[in-house]
Image (cartoon, rainbow, N blue to C red):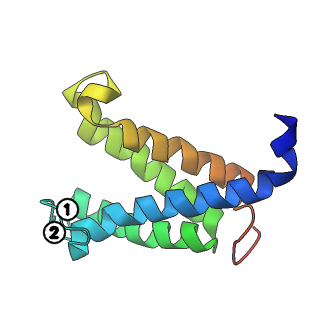
């Protein structure tokens, strides 16, 4: 779609911001109960550590500050979460509830490779 080529950096920046906010929401829900959820893991558990990573990496990705390393760590966290928590339930992501983990994993891997796009604090 050639007509969108000139907006590629801005679209990449918007994808980064929206993905970072959605990712951060998962961690905030786990540890600060915002938005309210039933999952409240202890900080030292695997879901608790994942929640901390979701908050910190999600914030860094959203604002575009050290977004490449944050996105790489977030991508690995989601790959790990998928194979530890979701894959044992079923082979199919729709049935095991892991579709969000897969999407986060590959969106963040793409952001780690391409950089933050527009609207970021640093351009690296």
- The spot of residue 102 in percent (x, y) is 43, 38
Q: Nearer the viewer, residue 71 or 28?
A: 28
> In the figure, 82 relative to 22: above or below?
above
- Which quadrant: the C terminus? bottom right
As drawn, 53 above or below 12: below
Residue at the far top: name it. Answer: 91
Instruction: Name the residue at 19% across, 67% down.
Output: 36
Measured in 3D between alpha carbons, the distance from the residue under mark 1 to the one under mark 2, in whole angstroms, is: 6 Å
Q: How many marks?
A: 2
Neighbours of disc 2 within 10 Å: few (<14), some (14-19), many (20+): few
Callout 1 touching callout 2 (CB < 8 Å): yes
Q: Which residue is mark 2?
A: 42
Q: Residue furthest front?
A: 3
Residue at the location (47% across, 47% down)?
104
Q: Which element type, helix, strand or loop, lies under badge 1? A: loop
Q: Which residue is mark 1?
A: 45
Q: Locate residue 60, reporting x and y percent.
A: 54, 72
Q: 18 left or right of 43?
A: right
- The N terminus: image quadrant: top right
Residue 54 percent location from the top left of the image: 39, 64
Q: Is 55 displayed left or right of 5 in the figure?
A: left
Q: Nearer the viewer, residue 94 or 40?
A: 94
Residue 64: quadrant of the picture: bottom right
Q: Quadrant of residue 55?
A: bottom left
Task: Name the foreground residue: 80 vs 10.
Answer: 10
User: What residue is drawn where x is 69% and y is 78%?
Assistant: 121
Q: Secondary structure at mark 2?
A: loop
Residue 34: x percent and y percent?
25, 72
Q: Is residue 110 above or below residue 90?
A: below
Q: Mark 1 packing: few (<14 Cα in 10 Å), some, or many (20+)?
A: few
Where is 41 relative to 96, above or below?
below
Farthest residue to the left: give it: 38
């Amino acid at each position: 779609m050639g007509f969108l080529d000139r907006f590629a950096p801005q679209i990449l920046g918007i994808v980064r911001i929206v993905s970072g906010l959605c990712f951060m929401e998962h961690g905030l829900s786990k540890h600060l109960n915002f938005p309210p959820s039933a999952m409240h893991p202890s900080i030292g558990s695997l879901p608790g550590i994942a929640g901390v990573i979701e908050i910190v990496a999600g914030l860094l990705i959203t604002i575009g500050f050290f977004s490449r390393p944050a996105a790489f760590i977030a991508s690995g966290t989601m790959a790990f979460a998928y194979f530890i928590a979701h894959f044992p339930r079923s082979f199919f992501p729709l049935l095991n509830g892991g579709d969000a983990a897969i999407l986060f994993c590959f969106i963040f891997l793409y952001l780690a490779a391409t950089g933050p796009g527009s609207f970021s604090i640093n351009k690296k």
